[in-house]
Every structure is written in structure tokens, then in C-alpha cells.
Image: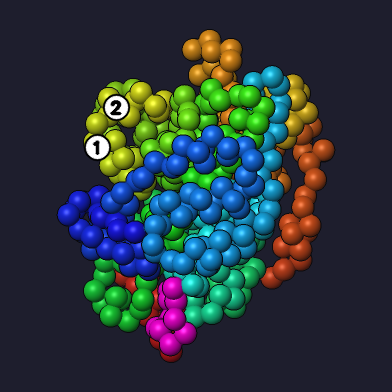
Amino acid sequence: MKLYSTNNTSLRVDFPDAVFNSLPQDNGLYMPVQIKPLDAKFLDKIDQYSLPEIAFEIAKNLLQDAMPENELRRIVNEAFNFPVPLIQLDKNTFALELFHGPSLAFKDFGARFMSRIMGYFLKKDEQMLDILVATSGDTGGAVAAGFYMVPNTRVTILYPKGKVSDIQKMQLTTNGENIHAVEVEGTFDDCQALVKLAFLDQGLKQRFRFTSANSINIARLIPQTFYYFNAYAQLKAKGMTNLVFSVPSGNFGNVAAGLLAFKMGLPVTQFLAATNINDTVPSFLKTGIYTPKPSVQTYSNAMDVGNPSNWVRIMDLFKEDPDQLKVILKGYSFSDEQTLDAINRIFETYNYVTCPHTAIGWLAANQWRDENQLSNAAMIFLSTAHPCKFPDVIPAQVKKVMVSPEQVIKLKASENKFDSISSDFSEFKNYLLEKYSS
């Protein structure tokens, strides 16, 4: 597998180089040189395949000769050992539950796959691999769970102070061992900027071997394509093939993965980018003007991103042609008030409990359906996190029936350990040099 930079299409690197370096030196993002369509025979019989079998076929198609097939099969079997149910709420509305992994969020797909990919390529005598992660909520917990005690790795997770839920913070700060949590006085965008600056700082690069576990890393993006094909397989078995995916969107890795799946042959009618009031992308899709803005804190905190990193990948997939992109992708944004109302309405109508991010996905699906009057379209909204991670947001009547998984109960009994810094890069640089000086 060869990859190029979105800032330099003539660049060529191998898959392990892209995984371990995360960002090209020109500050672009890595993209596969070839996106080969999946075999039509596979797609025709996809409803007969399990999730690990689907994951293997897609990964093999993308990675090509990057690693032996037996190792790739082992990795997907280990990484995806939890269910991904498609819950039918009414005749044409489905919730794709992506929160049954260890961190209770869809980020487990990318983190578990990536940690095992890195473990395969990482040699025992190599320099310590330092993984830097910025999180707006769920990424950090998934990466912590995925890389916990992985030999020769050290994970530093940056999260914005006061802008993650209590349970999300526990998932970042209760691990110990090779997992280190850093609370940043600022926003997610500040955390993300610190990570990118660290990758580009020559002094730090001489001391550390950095990589990222954010969705800027191509190894995070690839496995997120798997569940789109798995949802298609489940609906194909029901005779439904006119699919609309509504995707709660923050840093836009999830939508980028869906569009990558589309380029590989996923039969889909429409993608919906569902955001909170951090509406940089929906505004662009309406006006044609892309204007990054400071992020605003909302109840759906994992989506509080004002300058989504993966947007450059999406534009690259469509050759920088917004008119072509607008055919397949529509954008919607909703307020906190609308989000709370949606959580209540979903519960009252379907006796189903959603997190605030998932509720926004449902809102976008409903709005698109009202606008387009396609009665035969299967509306799939991605349920991205377990609602128990947001107890302060879930309305009281809904919270009464919400059951916390066992891992949450264990978290509450664990000790929290974290460091604190400002959003100034020089402070972060000094922190890294002093913390890991040995």
C-alpha cells in the first residue's frame, strides 16, 4: 500500500511509515494512492459475512501487500470481538450501535485496530513509540483502552479542562502504566494544535518518536469503514438497499470513513453530516465558504470542533470539487435545546435511550427524510457512544431507566491521575521533555 500527502500528491510512503509518522512533513494528511473498488461478488454476498470477515476483506483490499493475510486476519478477529447491532426503531429507522467495545464509544474500532497494527510493525529493539492524542471526549478513552500495557509504547492524552464528561475523564485518568493524561486549559482545538506543533518541532523530534492515535492517523480511519459495510450487510439481509447514513460529526473522521467506503463501492444514497452549533461544515455545504471558527462548548462535547482536521481528506476524495461532494453529503446543525428535546422524543416514541451525539444524528435523519419524502429509504443514524457517559445531559425521566455497564462502576472506584498545563506550546514542549527525560 502506498500513500501520498494531501499537500503533495507526488509523495509516496509505505503503510508503516504513514502509521508511525501520522502526519507528513508538509502538514497534510496521508491518503491511499489507490482506492480499489471491492469485488462485486463480495458485495453481492456480503449479508453472509460476519463483521470480522467483512473487516478482513476491506482491509485486505486497502492495505494490499502491506502485511501477510494471516496476520491481518488475526488482527481483525482480535480487534472486533464485540457486537455491532442494528436496532430497528420503526419500519425505516435504525440505530447502528457502535458503543459495545471496551470504552463504550465508536472510537474503539479505530483504536483497537491501530494498536494491533502498530504492535505488529513495532520491533522490540526500536525506540519507544510516543503516541500523542488530542481528545474532545471519546477518542482518548478508546486509545487508552487500546494501547494499555502495549509494549514499547507510551501514550499522552490531551483533553480540554471542564469540557469532557466525568466518565470520559475517568477513562482518561484511571489507567496508569503507559497511559498519561494531561488536562489543558483551553478547547479541543487547542489540544489538537499542541499535538500538531509537537509533530513538527525539530527539537522534540530529535528526542522522541512521535505518532498520533487521532483520526489524522490513517490506521484510525480505515477500520471505521468496516461498520458501514456491516450495516449494509444487515440491511441487505432484510431486502433494504436504499441507505441513508446520518453521522454525528466533530473532527469528521467518521464521515471521511463513510465516504471512503462509498469510493470502495458501498451502495449508499446519501450521507448526512450531523453537527451541533459548531457548524463549520454544514455552513460550507450551504454557502461554499469554508470558515474555521473557535469551537463552542455544547452538550455533545465530542463534536465541539471548529476546524475539523479530516475535512482536507474529504475534499481530497472529491478532488477539491465541492459541487461533486454536495451530491452525496448534506449538512445539518442543531442546538443544545433541540438535542435535549430529541433525547426525550426518542425515548417517548421508541423507549430507546441515546447519548446527545446520537440524538443529533437522529435529528438530521428526520429532517432529511421530511425534506426528501423518500418513504423507502432506510435511515441509519450512528449511535456513537453509550448514554451513560453523559449523565449530566440525559433528562431525569430517561436517566431512570438507563443502566450503567460494569466497566463504568469499576471506573468510579479508581484513582484519577493527571497533569495540568496551559494551551501554550512552549509549556507543553517543556512538559514532554521533563516528564520523559529518562
Direction right: furthest residue: 401
User: Can residue 259 be seen here?
Assistant: no
User: Can residue 415 be seen here?
Assistant: yes
Q: Amino acid at mark 1?
A: Lys
- Circle count: 2
Secondary structure under badge 1? loop
How crowded pointer 2 is (Cα within 10 Å; few <14, some 14-19, many 20+) is rated as: few
- The residue under the point 48% across, 30% down is 267
Q: Say which of 29 and 39 sits in front.
A: 39
Residue bounds of the magenta highlight = 121-130
- From the image, tell me which residue sits under label 1: 319
> Residue 28, percent across and down?
26, 54
> Residue 288, percent across and down?
27, 26
On the rendered image, what quadrant is the C terminus found in?
bottom left
Between discs 2 and 1, the one toward the N terminus: 1
- From the image, tell me which residue sits under label 2: 324
> Residue 115, percent across and down?
52, 66
Q: Say which of 18 and 154 sits in front.
A: 18
Q: Is residue 129 inside the magenta stretch?
A: yes
Q: Amino acid at mark 2?
A: Gln
**Would you identify the image quadrant in which residue 19 lies?**
bottom left
As drawn, 185 above or below 263: below
> Residue 3, percent across and down?
29, 56
